Amino acid sequence: MNAIEKVGEYASLMYRTITKPDRWSIFWKQYVNEVKKQGIDSLWIVVIISTFIGAVITIQMVLNTENPLLPTYSTGLATRDTLLLEFSSSIMCLILAGKVGSNIASEIGTMRITEQIDALDIMGVNSANYLILPKITAFMTIIPCLVLVSMFVGIIGGYCVGIFTDIITVHDYEVGIQYAFIPFYVTYSVIKGIVFAFIISSVSSYYGYTVKGGALEVGKSSTDAVVNSSVLILLFNVMLTKLLLT
């Protein structure tokens, strides 16, 4: 299947997906379950990675900017802006594409090859709306929380470098993270996170929903979902940066 056919098939699936649920009570029940699976269960990996990345960025900035002409607060400033502008939205979503995206694709793909989706269609249920919409809405609503947690924990990680080492003083770091702060950077990062969450959940759902064959094809569809989601995230990252920051 060529790229144009895949885009058309994806658009058709999203058209079926983004409609009013037949029963709101079932939708909200599934929505809550998806928030737990995609958001709360991903919190630990966001916290761990963000903490260490914040610390590593701080250490590397100190070691690679040893210049008497640079102000002492430049390390905190660079760490803050790196986390806010790129890591907590773009890089974190690339990481979550591997965890959340593969989970969605394999879950729906397994339902497809075991003919559970066919059974829903036979019963007159809009299977795309029933299975995919709760996943998309749940991930899009929980991702701002994950992005904000990543920002906060990443900055704390850099702060710990100042506390437990003599590489940088806590005062210099604090001045840097407060200097010339632009609140829109947080909004910008959250907007990117929501767009990326839609890409991850919808693309992964598409690859799972359209899988054909057996268990081997489910594994391949899961890999394709992660790869294509990552490529689209990088593409939209450039576009959103151009639109929102220029």
Image (cartoon, rainbow, N blue to C red):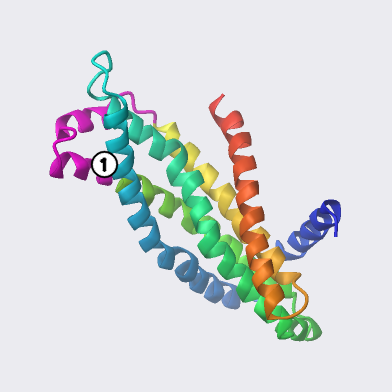
Determine crowd level at label 1: few under 14, some 14-19, many 20+ residues with C-alpha closer than 10 A: many
The image shows residue 225 at horizontal and vertical percentages of: 65, 61
Q: Left or right: where does residue 36 sit relative to residue 125?
A: left
Residue furthest out toward the top: 69
Q: Does the magenta stretch include residue 17?
A: no
Q: Does the magenta stretch include residue 177?
A: yes
Amino acid type shown at disc 1: Gly
Residue 20 appears anywhere in the view: no
The image shows residue 46 at horizontal and vertical percentages of: 39, 56
Residue stretch rendered in magenta on the structure: 156-182
* Image quadrant in which you'd find residue 125: bottom right
* Image quadrant in which you'd find residue 104: bottom right
Query: Residue sitting at 27 percent across and 31 percent down?
Result: 63
Query: Residue sitting at 21 percent across and 32 percent down?
Result: 174
Asked which secondary structure carries label 1, the reply is: helix
Task: Classify the position of the N terminus by image quarter.
Answer: bottom right
The image shows residue 64 at horizontal and vertical percentages of: 32, 28
Closer-to-camera residue (52/40)? 52
Query: Residue sitting at 52 percent across and 70 percent down?
Result: 34
Asked if 54 appears above or below 219 in the picture, the reply is above
Closer-to-camera residue (181/32)? 181
Q: Mark 1 points at which residue?
A: 158
Task: Classify the position of the C terminus by image quarter.
Answer: top right
Asked if 26 appears above or below 174 in the picture, the reply is below
Closer-to-camera residue (213/204)? 213
Residue 129 appears anywhere in the view: yes
